[in-house]
Image (tube, rainbow, N blue to C red):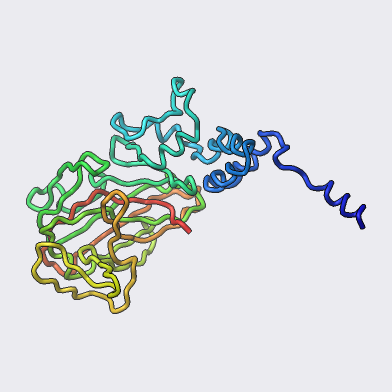
Amino acid sequence: MSKQITRTRRKHMDLQALPEGCIATVISLTTPRDAGTLSSVSWSFRSAADSDAVWGRFLPPDIHTILSSSSPSMSVQPPHVGPSSASKTKKELYLALCDNPVLIEQGKLSFSLDKWSGKKCYMIAARALSIVWADTPQYWKWISIPDSRFEEVAELVDVCWLEIHGRIETRMLSPSTLYKAYLVFKTTAQAYGFEHRAAEVTVGLIGEQRTNQNVFLGARRVQTRGQGYHMARPRGIRRTYILDQPREINEAQYPKERNDGWLEIEMGEFFCEGGEGGELEMSCLETKGRHWKSGLIVQGIEIRPKRM
């Protein structure tokens, strides 16, 4: 019996005795989050987990092409592009792209990485969206505000027909990834008109049938301690008529505050298989009521992986 136990023990391998290159290869087949966890196992694991061999696998294969179209005023200087970046590591580049989106395509798109998966994230600037009447000062105006990642945002002056579309080529997205799209916006203190009816949002490939869903841009849900949720109207509005308010609460139908202080509303989701051509279109419309609305500030539409 003791001989059998001894033979069994001899079959076990000390993983820390493996060459660092072998450890790095194994870690590179996991996820960025797993790499962070494994780096705490031992010194040898930390050295392997922090290596370029690992983080180079976590970066998108076309990262250099993406960053080559970055704007001179981008938030992050790409530390691994060009010969002068030899002192920078791929892990530093990865983390920089997670925390600081860069502007690409002449400032019409922002690019970043999802910290947990390394998947690509984009935000389409308001200037790159198709907004009905956007170039008519009577209805929309273009302003600059300090907390926007883009030079300009669109502020709604007054319209009765709200229609916003954004498009992105699917080849730009990470393959085998479930994406969600979000309208990123704010409302002014004098905003009105959005509390009356729901807006319709859709996400899908151009030319394919899509399913509409309703969202409430102006209705803010506020949680009060011990009293659950109630509806709060925007400041400056004396009366609020929420005609399309559902009886059953669906969190996805209401704006949520982001870490950057903006609001976002979920528009829908799309699974990118990879390899397929075409354009993904995201739309937000409120055209049925034909009542006037004002005070919406649109920064853009963000497309990012859904976190499981």
Q: Position of residue 36 (x, y in %)?
A: 54, 44
Position of 17 relative to 268 (above/below) = above
Nearest to the observer: residue 96 or residue 106: 96
Question: Is 86 situated left or right of 126 in this image?
Answer: right
Position of 77 relative to 206 (above/below) = above
User: Picture quarter containing residue 158?
Assistant: bottom left
Question: Is 67 situated left or right of 246 in this image?
Answer: right
Q: How many marks?
A: 0
Position of 157 relative to 145 (above/below) = below
Residue at 58% over, 43% down = 40
Q: Position of residue 15 (x, y in %)?
A: 71, 42
Which residue occupies the extreme bottom position in the image?
Answer: 247
- Of the 4 image quadrants, the one containing the N terminus is bottom right
Q: Position of residue 296 (x, y in %)?
A: 17, 56
User: Picture quarter containing residue 266?
Assistant: bottom left
Nearest to the observer: residue 157 or residue 17: 17
Residue at 88% over, 50% down = 6
Q: Position of residue 125 (x, y in %)?
A: 27, 45
Nearest to the observer: residue 253 or residue 286: 253
Residue at 46% over, 20% down = 83
